[in-house]
Image (cartoon, helix red, strand yellow):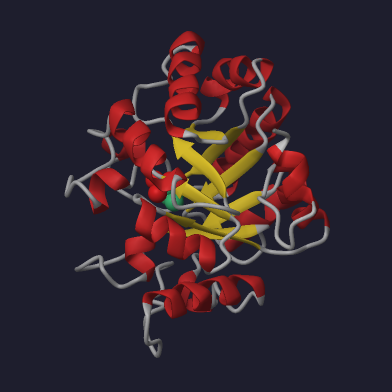
């Protein structure tokens, strides 16, 4: 009945928000990956990843879309449900897709779907100060929130491409302000995408939440990559921060373990994966 209490005695009990906070406090890097189905989720979990994200990157790597914009709540609910069946330890986070959180009420309805129908333990949304009311509403209803700042792929058509964000004093200051406001609004975790190393460091110094970086340099609390990028499945040009971990490994599980080890011993990201 009290599954959570029984799991506490396990060798590696399931990760929750308290574990993530403790890992930050103890400076243990948080290793994260995306997953989109039960089989890969199981391997990612076995490899020791602490957090699995069902990202709206599924639009690009699973559906073959050019951006994440066409992804729907139904798509994310479906992939979350099947990923959750493959996990036993890793913490499951799901993306609220484009325009599914335009108002606090809409965000609440869709976050409830990701949690109740999909099994997500936390929802992620892209935004800055404009999302404060949404984050406050979710937090007020005890829905754990990951705030995604830096490059926001759902805004690709407004930004004019997938570009490094936060370059220059003004932009870095604005991003720091956004991060602080999202923390005060009740976010539990932050994902920081595609910013110069110094911006990653600056935001880390300003907020207490664990920060997971993707192309945000080494000075954050954890790293995440898109599964199909780090397994060398994605064809063509990939972002600078991507490393193919299948090199010198024999199996998919070996490659996933190599990634988790590299995050834990801080050998990833190396200089060549960072922005200045
Ligand atoms: O959708 C996604 O996969 C993401 C990445 C930044 C990990 O948000």
* Residue drawn at x 30%, y 27% as measured from the top left: 74
Is residue 4 visible in the rendered image? The answer is yes
Pick the front one: 5 or 30? 5
The answer to whether residue 256 is left or right of residue 237 is right
Pick the front one: 160 or 269? 269
As drawn, the residue found furthest toward the bottom would be 248
The answer to whether residue 199 is left or right of residue 81 is right
Q: Residue 144 at x, y = what percent?
A: 62, 30
* Residue drawn at x 51%, y 35% as measured from the top left: 120
Image quarter (top left, top right, bottom left or bottom right) of the N terminus: top right
Pick the front one: 37 or 174? 37
Q: Residue 264 at x, y = what percent?
A: 65, 71
Q: Quadrant of residue 213?
A: bottom right
Q: Residue 89 at x, y = what percent?
A: 60, 54
Counting the numbered discs, the total is 0
Answer above or below: position of 17 versus 239: above
Pick the front one: 163 or 30? 30
As drawn, the residue found furthest toward the right would be 26
Answer above or below: position of 111 versus 271: above
Q: Residue 41 at x, y = what percent?
A: 43, 56
């Amino acid at each position: 009945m009290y599954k959570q209490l029984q799991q506490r005695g396990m060798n590696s009990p399931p990760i929750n928000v308290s574990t993530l906070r403790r890992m930050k406090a103890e400076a243990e890097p948080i290793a994260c990956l995306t997953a989109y189905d039960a089989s890969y989720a199981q391997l990612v979990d076995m490899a020791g990843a602490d957090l699995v994200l069902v990202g709206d990157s599924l639009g690009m790597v699973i559906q073959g879309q050019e951006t994440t914009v066409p992804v729907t709540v139904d798509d994310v609910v479906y992939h979350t449900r099947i990923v959750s069946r493959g996990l036993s330890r890793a913490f499951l986070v799901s993306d609220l897709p484009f325009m599914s959180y335009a108002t606090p009420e809409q965000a609440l309805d869709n976050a409830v779907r990701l949690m109740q129908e999909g099994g997500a333990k936390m929802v992620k949304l892209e935004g800055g100060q404009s999302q404060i009311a949404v984050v406050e509403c979710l937090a007020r209803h005890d829905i754990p929130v990951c705030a995604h700042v830096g490059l926001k792929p759902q805004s690709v058509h407004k930004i004019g491409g997938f570009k490094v964000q936060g370059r220059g004093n003004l932009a870095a200051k604005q991003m720091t302000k956004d991060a602080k406001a999202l923390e005060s609004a009740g976010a539990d975790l932050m994902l920081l995408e595609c910013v110069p190393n110094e911006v990653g460091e600056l935001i880390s110094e300003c907020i207490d939440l664990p920060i997971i970086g993707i192309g945000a340099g080494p000075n954050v609390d954890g790293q995440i990559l898109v599964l199909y990028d780090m397994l060398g499945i994605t064809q063509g040009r990939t972002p600078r921060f991507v490393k193919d971990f299948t090199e010198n490994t024999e199996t998919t599980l070996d490659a996933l373990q190599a990634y988790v080890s590299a995050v834990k011993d801080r050998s990833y990201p190396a200089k060549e994966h960072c922005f200045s």
